[in-house]
Image (cartoon, rainbow, N blue to C red):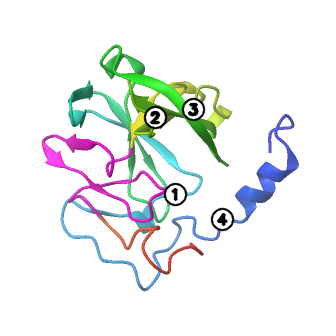
Amino acid sequence: MNRDEPAWLQQARDKWTNRGQSRPPFAEEPGPGQDSVWDFPRPPAVVPDERRVQVSSADGLLASADRSVRILETSHPPTFYVPPEALIPGRLVVTSGSSHCEWKGAAEYLAVTGTVEPIGWRYPDPYPEFAEHAGWVSFYPDRAECTVDGEAVRPQAGGFYGGWITDDVVGPFKGEPGTSGW
């Protein structure tokens, strides 16, 4: 633990039981070109991705990037983050609400200009593990149309998580009924 981090942070991290070191018996077997989310590590990995990521709302494009990062965390479908320069200027504003990730830090939420419901989030001042990606934005695929190389993203169940389900990942995924203990 970094001496500047509070003890509660390490305690939260110590509660992680699944760390990607072994796939549980209920995990789906990945096929060719697929990854099991049960092989993803914890703490999560930040993996560069060069596929085209596009995000739109009902009234138009919000972000477009040929460079993003995927966060790969045990039991979760990847979450794609795009750099700030991928955002369409003037389309998003900071909105109310916040949350905390024991790995990335305090999140702030973004809404489409003229609305208040969060459609995405970012970490303006993250913990050191995510510092290189401060200000990068991810979106909720159940609130925005998200695509990866033209494939429509399916949202992670549960309403809280923002994982992006594509054909190249298999679960089961955290957020589905009965998964709160993962």
* Residue type of the residue flagged with mark 4: Trp
Which dot, 1 or 3, sits closer to the camera?
3
Image coordinates of residue 166 in percent, x first then y, are 24, 56
Count of picture labels: 4
Work out how far the residue at label 4 is from the one at label 3, CA to CA, in angstroms: 21 Å
| Residue 41, disc | 1
Residue at 43% of width from left, 37% of height from top? 120
Q: Is residue 64 above or below residue 14?
A: above
Amino acid type at image mark 1? Pro
Residue 66 can be seen in this image: no
Badge 1 vs badge 3, beta-carbon distance below 8 Å: no
Nearer-N-terminus badge (4/1): 4
Residue range of the region highlighted in magenta in the rendering: 140-169
The residue under label 2 is which amino acid type? Val
Q: Name the residue under label 3.
A: 123
Magenta: main secondary structure equals: loop
Of labels 2 and 3, earlier in sequence is 2
Q: Earlier in the sequence, mark 2 or mark 4?
A: 4
Q: Position of residue 34 (x, y in %)?
A: 25, 62
Name the residue that disc number 4 marks: 16
Instruction: Say if 65 sits above or below 53 in the image.
Output: above
Between the C-alphas of marks 2 and 4, the distance is 33 Å
Query: Residue at label 2?
Result: 116
